[in-house]
Image: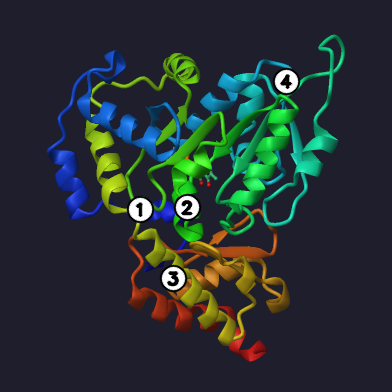
Amino acid sequence: MIDLRSDTQTRPSPEMRAAIAAAEVGDEQKREDPTVNELERRAAELLGQEEAVFVPTATMANEIALRTLGQPGDEVIGEENSHIFLAELGGPAVHAGLMTRPLRCVAGRFSPEQIRETVRVTDGTHVPHTRIVSVENTHNASGARVWPIEEIEAVAATARELGVNLHLDGARVMNASVASGVPSAQIGSHFDTVTLCLSKGLGCPLGALVAGSAEHMANARRLKHLFGGAMRQAGIVAAAGVYALEHNIGRLADDHERARRLAEGLDAAGVPVDLEQVETNFVQVDLAPLGLSPEDALARLWEHRVGLSMTAHPTKLRAVTHLDVGDEDIEQAVDLIPRALGALAHA
Ligand SMILES: Cc1ncc(COP(=O)(O)O)c(C=O)c1O
């Protein structure tokens, strides 16, 4: 089986398992777990923030961040298919009481003008405050595309001018950093809060971090407990994170290179892919010209022992490269996917 469904499908490597087995642990709730403390210290540094808080999932990291930055009745602005709007079960409304103002965008990126048009200026007596702008980088639904640093700077400057907080859903910000050559700390430093996921391209079994100022992170720690996320000997898991930050960031370039090779191979074989979309580790396949439904296409692919997955777009599937996908898998996928989709007949 060539599992290209998601970069969440990685299994911990033998070296990561050895780091887990050797982890020093303590009571995380009391901040006595040295491995969690070390992971939080390293993550804060990598994300250009004062402190970071270790949590089980990136969803929890996002939800804690939004609750830290906004009050019930406030508004959060973000791209309409961003993870916080599309895939967190309405969490911003449930956990933080936030109103959501989705923006329609190209490639997951919005402009300073869109923020300016959307932010509500209010004296607080009648109209809700727009309190948070949320950026997702890389942006999942658009095909894991990267925000250029100049656009982040422009959006951040506008948000600051308007007195609005900034959150970065950087679940895959290390992919963005590696692809763009911009240090992750430089990207992260523009935001009040930053989420980083460990269980995607970084290859951990679970874990995420939310980072921000010492003041915001004191609140984040309180919210983590409130959400039931304060743990005990969590160093067992954090050890995987420390290992990943040391060993698995630079190699994301290999995933990006394989995604590009896959996209070019599929394109040459007549599978409809948008080569411009392939900036990191996702390749989106458009089924519309092939006349296949996503369910039908996924079933055919499964029969050929290749796993792809659905996207936010009704006619597009995605193939995602990751730690457990090698060069041979890509070669085979370039052969199997067109056959499964009957693409050669359409080429
Ligand atoms: C952009 C983005 N943010 C957050 C998440 C949530 O991650 P988790 O599954 O760890 O909650 C995902 C997961 O796919 C994601 O793609």
- Residue under numbered circle 1: 249
Q: Closer to the camera: disc 2 or disc 3?
A: 2
Question: How many angstroms separate mark 4 from mark 2 (CA)?
Answer: 31 Å
Question: How many angstroms separate mark 2 from mark 1 (CA)?
Answer: 9 Å
Tell me which residue sits at (50%, 53%) in the image: 176
The amino acid marked with disc number 1 is Ile
Q: Earlier in the sequence, mark 3 or mark 4?
A: 4
Query: Residue 95, image x and y in percent?
Result: 59, 21
Tell me which residue sits at (65%, 53%) in the image: 312
Q: In this view, does 21 lie above or below 15?
A: above
Q: Earlier in the sequence, mark 2 or mark 1?
A: 2
- Residue under numbered circle 3: 257
Question: How many angstroms separate mark 3 from mark 1 (CA)?
Answer: 14 Å
Query: Residue 59, image x and y in percent?
Result: 51, 35
Question: How many angstroms separate mark 3 from mark 4 (CA)?
Answer: 41 Å
Residue density around tag 1, few if under 14, some if 14–19, many if 20 or more, within 10 Å: some
Q: Which mark is residue 177?
A: 2
Asked if marks 2 and 1 touch (Cβ < 8 Å), the reply is yes
> Residue 344: which quarter of the image?
bottom right
Q: Earlier in the sequence, mark 4 or mark 2?
A: 4
Q: Closer to the camera: disc 4 or disc 1?
A: 1
Question: How many angstroms separate mark 2 from mark 3 (CA)?
Answer: 15 Å
Instruction: Label 1: state its secondary structure.
Output: loop
